[in-house]
Amino acid sequence: MPCTTILVGRQASNDGSTMIARTDDGHFDVKKMIVVEPKDQPKKYKSVISHLEIELPDNPLRYTACPSVDRKEGIWAATGINAANVGMTATETITSNPRVLSADPLVEYKKAATRREKDTPGGIGEEDIVVLVLPYIRSAREGVLRLASLLEQYGTYESNGIAFNDENEVWWLETIGGHHWMAKRVPDEVCVIAPNQFGMDSFDLDDAFGEQKDHLCSADLREFIAENDLDLNQYDLFASAADGLDEDVLKSAAFNPRDVFGSRTDMDHIYNTPRAWFMGRYLAPYTYKWDGADADFTPESDDIPWCLIPGRKVTVEDVKYLLSSHYQGTAFNPYTSQDTGKRGMYRSIGINRTGVTALCQIRPDVPDEIKGLEWICFGSTTFTQFLPLYTNVSRMPKYVSNVTLDTSTENFYWSSRLIGALADSAYSGCIQNIERYQNAVMSRGRRIVLEYDRKMIESGDFSLTEKANEELCAMAREQTTSTLNKVLAEVSTHMKNGYNRADN
């Protein structure tokens, strides 16, 4: 699924939390936010798309999820935080290349050619991964290991990147072909930017095949690279000083997974790399030169870093801004009134068909019962705002969980979709109300969380998480309804059939 991901290490964030966030950019998928209790987790899972059946462990944890309301193509749980305060987002669809996909083909469902034959199940995919992994892990590293075992056993029918976080660590896993994979612990001081491409641009194979402190991968990855001539370095990836090569030559042979397993296409330069450029430009404005004839990186550069040390500490608001962006402040902004000749030429991050965007935040220095906050918004992120919700609850308020396929103003999903669809057509007239709305929801949402954090820490009554969520949703409903009223009034004045007697 075409999405955008941002990962924030604990030393890169303003409050010491770890954050993983992703836009889930389907085709106007109707989404909701729910809590899945252990009793409701299936014992045997069957994928709708790949027809694969998998027996599941008997000890699931409670977890939050953002499934599709229409289950015709499966659950698509998207993201969540479990009772052990482990977050997960799955998945960021990534790219690969024919050399990899021919060496280890994707595992696709095959319908039997005749009645006497049996269908051949496919592997696992985005439809399945959260349900198969999140209820059974107690750390981000455990998430990598469980998902890796499933990939090796069943394979996958698509190329994906998956993120996990706990209080201390963030891990990122990327699939390689049908069964191979590699994963890296995100350094604490960096942010990762991932725009639908194979992203990792460095990887310590010695660590992965040794101590495994920060790197993990398929047990046969070295052989897989060598046997299929995947190494594109000028010098042998596995060369050493014993081969008579000097230090500079050895550095030039450093392993770059993006070159080996990823893509470099014209479509990447329109659809993917510009998003990485905008995010990098915002996060590290002084580390590199992003604009001008002598820029280090342009929107079409293939070597934009996978991770960056940000110029300042990163907040939830920063993540939301980036995941809402449409190249504002550049010639590529589709909403600019200037005739730049470049409007809309690159795929925006904040896009019309986003179903849900979620940020899983695991906070330090608070009791375990309230460490997990999931910031959620629906529809086009350009016009919506994150709403924080505690995840240590048995249910979610109806405003985010009671969503049907019919358009309604009774829930956060459809109200957000309506605001976006209306405001887009009259951007300049509506943007002031949108910005006021976004500031109100964020500031009031933060205030409610601060108040309830204090109440629960002082009283020890952590059942107040559900009351807090109800108050947060009531606030969001009030602000969203008010903004919808204002946007509708503004857009109505621009209808093409408007006419006054004075126009005569």
Image: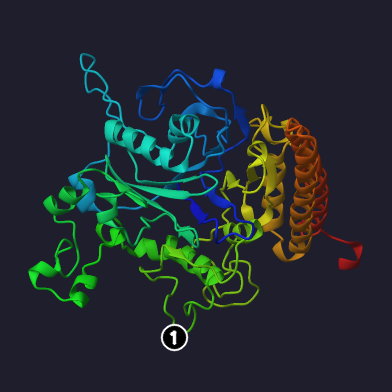
Viewer-side residue, 500 vs 346: 346
> How many marks overall?
1
Residue ranking furthest to the right:
501
Asked if residue 475 lies left or right of residue 58, the reply is right
Residue at the image position 59 percent from the left and 77 percent from the top: 339
Q: Is residue 53 above or below residue 381?
A: above
Residue 7 rendering spot, x and y as whole percentages: 51, 55
Residue at the image position 79 percent from the left and 59 percent from the top: 436
Viewer-side residue, 261 vs 25: 261
Viewer-side residue, 190 vs 415: 190
Q: Is residue 398 visible?
A: yes
Viewer-side residue, 419 vs 218: 218
Residue 427 falls in image quadrant:
bottom right
Residue 304 falls in image quadrant:
bottom left
Q: How is the image coloured?
A: rainbow
The crowd level at tag 1 (other Cα within 10 Å; few <14, some 14-19, many 20+) is few
Which corner quadrant holds the N terminus?
A: top left
Residue 262 rendering spot, x and y as whole percentages: 30, 57
According to the picture, the residue beneath numbered tag 1 turns out to be 293
Q: Secondary structure at mark 1?
A: loop
Q: Is residue 504 visible?
A: no
Asked if residue 471 lies left or right of residue 119, the reply is right
Residue at the image position 30 percent from the left and 52 percent from the top: 96
Residue 296 rendering spot, x and y as whole percentages: 42, 79
Residue at the image position 12 percent from the left and 73 percent from the top: 245
Asked if residue 425 lies left or right of residue 169, the reply is right
* Residue type at tag 1: Ala
Residue 54 falls in image quadrant:
top left
Residue ranking furthest to the left:
243
Residue 4 rendering spot, x and y as whole percentages: 50, 54
Which corner quadrant holds the C terminus?
A: bottom right
